[in-house]
Amino acid sequence: MAACFFTQKLKRRLIVCLIGIIVMIVSITAVFIHGDTDHIEYNGKSILLRAESIQDQREFASEMGIKLSENPVMIQKVRIPERFSKVYNEYNEEQKKAGFDLTEYKGKKCTLYTYAIKNPVESRKEFYDILISEGKIIGTDKNINRTLS
């Protein structure tokens, strides 16, 4: 009887260990499939997406070759739509080309920081938007000759 009990106990331990191993494998696989979400690849460089301060945002833009004004010219609270319109789908496709994807942020509130670009092409007025959620850059975009309201 004791041998049978030991066998059942051993079986449970083995099952718990196997479940633990499976969870670890799934977790590791998820990291490799989804990649590093704290960095973006740009021109062969890995750029940190942390944006807990204005300085972090300016450093990110600098790594992208864009020199921003000292402070944002506008800060807005925005909500990513839960359902993307045709226009928003096109916008998100452009974000994906840049290494971002707003799909996982559908319905979430974010902050949009708009900066004047200090090194614009030609003499046009250019602005650079940085979209942030929970201290992380989730999207960017460059706007030319836009008027701010």
Image: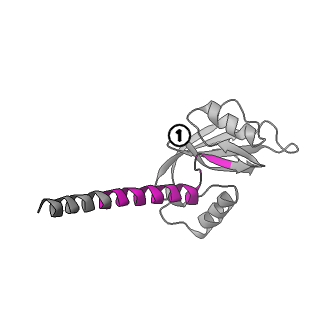
Whether residue 102 is visible to the viewer of this picture, yes or no, is no
| x and y percentages locating residue 125 in the rendered image | 79, 43
Tell me if residue 23 comes above or below residue 60 in the rendering.
below
User: Which region of the structure is painted magenta?
Assistant: 15-40
Residue in the foreground of this view, choosing between 96 and 47? 47
The residue depicted at 46 percent of the width and 60 percent of the height is 26
Residue in the foreground of this view, choosing between 140 and 76? 140
Quadrant where the N terminus lies? bottom left
Compared across the picture, whether 81 is left or right of 115 comes to: left
Compared across the picture, whether 106 is left or right of 62 comes to: left
The residue depicted at 72 percent of the width and 44 percent of the height is 127
Residue under numbered circle 1: 135
The residue depicted at 13 percent of the width and 59 percent of the height is 2
Q: Secondary structure at mark 1?
A: loop
| x and y percentages locating residue 61 in the rendered image | 71, 40
Whether residue 51 is visible to the viewer of this picture, yes or no, is yes
Q: For residue 115, which quarter of the picture?
A: top right
Magenta stretch prevailing secondary structure? helix
Inspect the image, locate mark 1, and give the three-letter code of the amino acid beneath it.
Answer: Gly
Tell me if residue 138 comes above or below residue 2 in the rendering.
above
Q: Mark 1: few, some, or many residues within 10 Å (few <14, many ≥20)?
A: some
Compared across the picture, whether 121 is left or right of 144 comes to: right
Compared across the picture, whether 108 is left or right of 132 comes to: left
| x and y percentages locating residue 113 in the rendered image | 61, 41
Residue at the far right: name it: 122
| x and y percentages locating residue 126 in the rendered image | 76, 44
62 in magenta: no
Quadrant where the C terminus lies? top right
Residue in the foreground of this view, choosing between 63 and 76? 63
